[in-house]
Amino acid sequence: MASSSPTEFSWRTLFSKIILISSTLIQHTNGCFTSIISFGDSLADTSNLPLPNFAFPPYGETYFGSPTGRSSDGRLITDFIAQYFGLPLLPPYIGGKSASNRSFLKGVNFAVADATALDVAFFEERGVHTVFTNVSLGVQLGLFTEMLPSLCQTSSDCKELLQSSLILLGEIGGNDYNNPFFARESIEEIQSYVSPVINAIASAINLGARTIMVPGNLPIGCSASYLTLFKSFSTEEYDSETGCLIWLNKFAEYHNELLQIKLNQIQQLNPHITIIYADYYHAAMEFYRSTKEFGFAMRALTSCCGGGGPYNFNRSVECGRQPSTVCNKTADYASWDGLHLTEAAYRWIFRGLFEGPYTIPHIGTLCVPTTPSA
Ligand SMILES: *[C@@H]1O[C@H](CO)[C@@H](O)[C@H](O)[C@H]1NC(C)=O
Ligand SMILES: *[C@@H]1O[C@H](CO)[C@@H](O)[C@H](O)[C@H]1NC(C)=O
Ligand SMILES: *[C@@H]1O[C@H](CO)[C@@H](O)[C@H](O)[C@H]1NC(C)=O
């Protein structure tokens, strides 16, 4: 280790303990799961029903060289997880339907951009018309239940498949709040969605799988979209360290706290399964707090790609559409298009989960080899 870059050095300092603990485990984790089954929204959609602008450059430019339907310049957290376990990048179920279902044996993705945890009906009953897709979490689970028999012959086959799979349940729930926030619904109204959202996520846990990872919400107060739409002249609304909007981050933390309480309850009632909370919030706060150490210079809050303005975000000029502009070096930015993050930021979140302390219980402890001498 001759000269480590400042980025590496800081990361190692930050997580040195965990890296020491987990570095021996990491070698054994490949092959730990035979498949990944993913549900969620645009943070995980690998081209099921991508939004129209995801089909244009510069989406995908960093890793894939062209748009893939992902809401980033490159890989998503889900992609890094698949690669970590030596599995193929998750094929989209809806987007890849023409292929044989056998191609889903090592992984399948049901995540759909704009998807909500709650069904459309929940919002319509409340007169809130801000849902842009009806492929909610419940609908995604229905699609999965429908397709499962095509992957396994007998019920014990199916059980085995589920038990050796890692379920990624989210991130989901963000859009249940994003859409009404952007439509200027009151915070009281939106706050009242949190419990139902948590219940919707919780009711998805009993799929028959043994290992389920459930991510929380990102710090939305650091998102270029929220920073633009809720721009304030009152400096007290901003965290002086990060420049993020405090009240919106508190909202995300409120969701995450309720989610963790619920997950703990379910875990206690179901000791035979392992529910892992993936703390996207604090994994991301690392780079919002220490922008330079993570390589984002002063650009953690401004979008790489967008239609201008103080955070380079303008709802009427989306990334990928004229006359939006794109930064020269995407890895310098955490925010990709104002709503989604860059591959560089997603990689840091992934590393925070797998090498850092941000999975509870730690994902690395699940895959210890069972040989007696280990
Ligand atoms: C969702 O909406 C599409 C088109 O808007 C419709 O064809 C489909 O039947 C709907 N699906 C469900 C589950 O409601
Ligand atoms: C967003 O872009 C539109 C179209 O170019 C422009 O008219 C509008 O002023 C922009 N809004 C902001 C807040 O910059
Ligand atoms: C990208 O680099 C070119 C050439 O150095 C420069 O003219 C341009 O302003 C840069 N664009 C952005 C968005 O920084």
Image (spheres, rainbow, N blue to C red):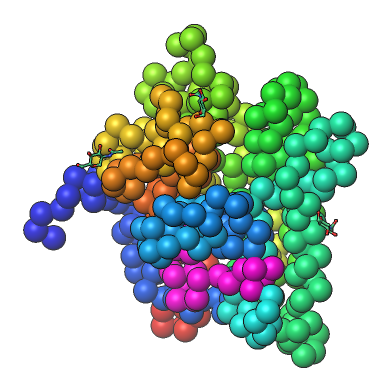
Q: Quadrant of residue 26?
A: bottom left
Can you see residue 170?
no
Residue at screen point 37% across, 51% down? 344
Q: Is residue 237 left or right of residue 124?
A: left
Residue at screen point 26% across, 40% down? 293
Against 245, residue 258 (above or below) is: below
Q: Position of residue 260 (x, y in %)?
A: 65, 44
Quadrant of the image where one finds ligand 1: bottom right
Q: Quadrant of residue 27?
A: bottom left
- Number of marks in picture: 0
Q: What residue range appears in magenta? A: 74-96
**Quadrant in which the C terminus appears:** bottom left
Residue at screen point 82% across, 48% down? 119
Q: Is residue 144 left or right of residue 253?
A: right
Residue at screen point 41% across, 83% down? 373
Q: Nearer the viewer, residue 296 or 48?
A: 48
- Dominant secondary structure of the magenta stretch? loop
Q: Residue furthest left?
A: 2
Against 225, residue 50 (above or below) is: below
Tell me, yes or no, whether the highlighted magenta stretch contains residue 77.
yes
Can you see residue 216?
yes
Against 28, residue 304 (above or below) is: above
Tell me, yes or no, whether the highlighted magenta stretch contains residue 145.
no
Q: Position of residue 59 (x, y in %)?
A: 45, 54
Q: Residue furthest bottom?
A: 153
Q: Residue furthest front?
A: 322
Q: Position of residue 353 (x, y in %)?
A: 46, 54
**Quadrant in which the N terminus appears:** bottom left
Q: Nearer the viewer, residue 315 or 1?
A: 315
Q: Residue furthest right?
A: 125
Q: Is residue 331 left or right of residue 148?
A: left
